[in-house]
Image (cartoon, rainbow, N blue to C red):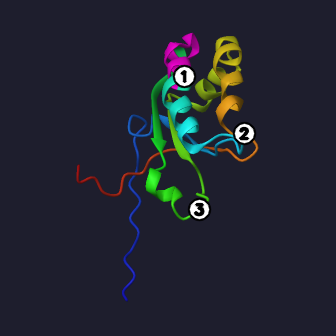
Amino acid sequence: MATLPVRRLSLTEEDNALIKLIVAVRKRADMSVEDFHTHWRTRHAELVRNCPATEKYVRKYVQCHTLPDQYADGDVAFDGTAELWFDSVADRDAFFSDPDYLSDVNPDEERFADMTQTVFFVTSEEPVLDNT
């Protein structure tokens, strides 16, 4: 099989302006799958939407929920992912240290997520294909 050369595009500052925090979320062991997804979709989403720190720092927030049929074979790697878009790593840091986030959103995370098994990582997108 032939190996294709990898061509790196040079990104302009505008193309690479936003960073994305991906959070791979595990539900609490004592919570049902249904209760986890319901809480995350409703109560937690509302807290994030209504938090003044979100308006200041977050450009986009997306929840990706593991499909129900994926639980049929037992344990899943993660119960979903969250994507939070920021203008910079500094804005990400400011969001997570903002008093409104700390008092309103942060306490709710442990009500539905196992924070010891939840993974956070910062990325920048490099689109490869978009047939949407």
Which residue is rendered at x = 60% and y = 57% of the image? 77
Q: Nearer the viewer, mark 1 or mark 3?
A: 3
User: Tag on residue 115?
Assistant: 2
User: Tag on residue 43?
Assistant: 1
Which residue is rendered at x = 49% and y = 25% of the image? 42
Which residue ends up furthest to the right in the rendered image?
A: 116
The magenta stretch spans residue 10:
no
Q: Is residue 28 left or right of residue 78?
A: right
Q: Secondary structure at mark 2?
A: loop
Q: Which residue is mark 3?
A: 74
User: Quick one: 70 or 3, which is closer to the camera?
Assistant: 70
What quarter of the picture does the N terminus occupy? bottom left
Q: Are marks 3 and 2 in contact (CB under 8 Å)?
A: no
Mark 3 is on which residue type? Gly
Q: Is residue 12 left or right of residue 47?
A: left
Q: Which residue range is magenta in the image? A: 45-55
Q: Secondary structure at mark 1?
A: helix
Q: Position of residue 117 (x, y in %)?
A: 72, 47
Q: Position of residue 98 (x, y in %)?
A: 67, 16
Q: CA distance from mark 1 to mark 3?
A: 26 Å
The answer to whether residue 42 is seen in the rendering is yes
